[in-house]
Amino acid sequence: MLRKLWAIAWFSAVEVLGHPATLLLTLASAIGTLLLPLFQFQRFSEDGRLARDCGLSTALLFGTLLAIGGAGRLHRALRDGTSAIALVKPLSRGLWFCGNALGTALALGVYLLTQGAATLLAEAYSPRYHAGGSYADVGAIFLAVGVAVGALVLAALNNRVRNGRFALSGSLLLPVALWVLVPFAPAVHWGDLTALVAVAMLLAQATALALALGVRCPPGLTAGVTLAALAVTLAYLGGAAYLPLEPLAGGGAVPARTLLLLAPQACFVTAFLLWCSMGLLDTKETL
């Protein structure tokens, strides 16, 4: 059973990562974050704070869009009969759904790796304020952008020489290329990764909600409801706990105790939504 689950998850992750929209979303997120220090004119009481806060916020928003894309793929599989072909094997509906959910989560993890590296680099290269003025590390910023473009060039060569999928290769090479630069960046704020873990917990819940909606709802409605739920969470339901920007001030990090308190809630909500999804799938007459 585990082998079947992993096979479905791997296929689903490859399909999500291999979609051109995923590469465009990841590239826009990373390049936009890397270039932000060039247009940073406010210090907000701390060097690099704007780049860090925007990078983490972008990870949450774009990660939600990626989750919605995974739910849209699930809905199309249910609508056009692709799922029926898979279930002939035979394969239980629950296992098929869990495999698709795990595949979407794997694709989301690859995106978070890319955006996490971009956020660390953007904060490290942000303007440093001195008596003579503020200076961003322009050379390092363009080097990081060049490395990202180089990853796309390698993906294009892989497509040309080996007939590999360009979008898939690009999505996988981008995080590798950016993380190669991170150890050489000055004064990397590793505490950002603790906030990224909290963001990942909220994204897991958003993904489960989007997949649950995707079983019965069209992509447009799924996107609207998921984004509305995210907005309500951030505005009224303690969203600051899942986007913890204040604890990062002054080189800080999100306390491990906070993450341990958030984890059970995130696991319960995610599991409950997935359980509801499988219930909706079981009551669906045709696949």
Image (cartoon, helix red, strand yellow):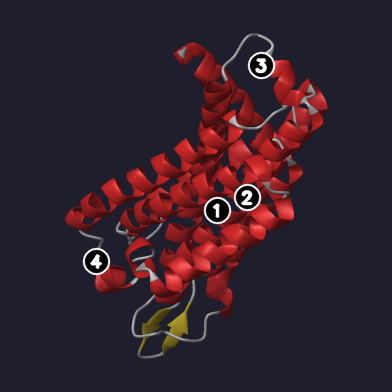
Looking at the rendered structure, the kind of residue marked 3 is Leu
Number of disc labels = 4
Query: In terms of image quadrants, where is residue 32?
Result: bottom right
Q: Position of residue 188 (x, y in %)?
A: 35, 59
Residue nearer the viewer, 204 or 199:
204
- Give the distance between the C-alpha atoms of the residues marked 3 and 4, in whole angstroms: 49 Å
Query: Within 10 Å of the Cα at label 1, are there few (<14), some (14-19), or many (20+) other Cα atoms?
Result: many
Q: Are marks 3 and 4 in contact (CB under 8 Å)?
A: no
Quadrant in the rendering for residue 196 = bottom left
Mark 2 lies on residue:
68
State the SS at label 3: helix
Q: Is residue 22 above or below residue 246?
A: above
Eye-nearest disc, 2 or 4: 2
> Three-letter amino acid code at disc 4?
Gly
Mark 4 vs 1, N-terminal side: 1
The label nearer to you, 1 versus 3, is 3
* Residue tagged 1: 63
Badge 2 vs badge 4, beta-carbon distance below 8 Å: no
First along the sequence among labels 3 and 4: 3
